[in-house]
Image (cartoon, grey):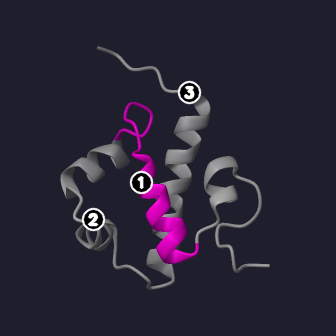
């Protein structure tokens, strides 16, 4: 079965991985494995999602982790408006 994702869904997934990259640059995580270990997620599923962002669904709880635990802006994650981090003015 082929799943057709909306442009908005794909954009949110892109921003999710962009935020992970920024967290790595800020040295808040070492990489995707650090993130998956922290939340007991399957690393290989996350790698597949990263490689196939236009074909796979991102679980909503992953966004929650970024907002709640790393200060990523929910508005930015969902809409692309504003800055990636809520504390960036």
Labelled disc at residue 39: none
Which residue is under mark 1?
61
Q: From the viewer's perspective, tell me whether residue 85 is left or right of residue 16.
A: right
Labelled disc at residue 36: 2
- The image shows residue 82 at horizontal and vertical percentages of 77, 62
Q: Earlier in the sequence, mark 3 or mark 2?
A: 3
**Which of the two discs, 1 and 3, sits closer to the camera?**
1
Which residue is under mark 3?
6
Determine the CA span between mark 1 and mark 3: 19 Å
**Residue name at image x 42 percent, y 54 percent:** 61
What secondary structure is found at the residue carrying circle 3? loop
Start-end of magenta stretch? 52-71
Determine the CA span between mark 3 and mark 2: 25 Å
Q: Is residue 34 above or below residue 51?
A: below
**Residue name at image x 29 percent, y 67 percent:** 39
Among all residues in the image, which is located at the extreme bottom? 27
Among all residues in the image, which is located at the extreme right? 89
């Amino acid at each position: 079965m082929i799943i057709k994702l909306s442009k908005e869904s794909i954009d949110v997934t892109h921003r999710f991985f962009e935020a992970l990259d920024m967290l790595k640059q800020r040295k808040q995580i070492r990489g995707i494995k650090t993130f998956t270990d922290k939340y007991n997620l399957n690393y290989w599923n996350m790698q597949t999602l990263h490689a196939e962002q236009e074909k796979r669904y991102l679980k909503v709880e992953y966004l929650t982790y970024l907002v709640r635990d790393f200060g990523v802006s929910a508005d930015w994650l969902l809409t692309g408006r504003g800055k990636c981090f809520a504390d960036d003015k």
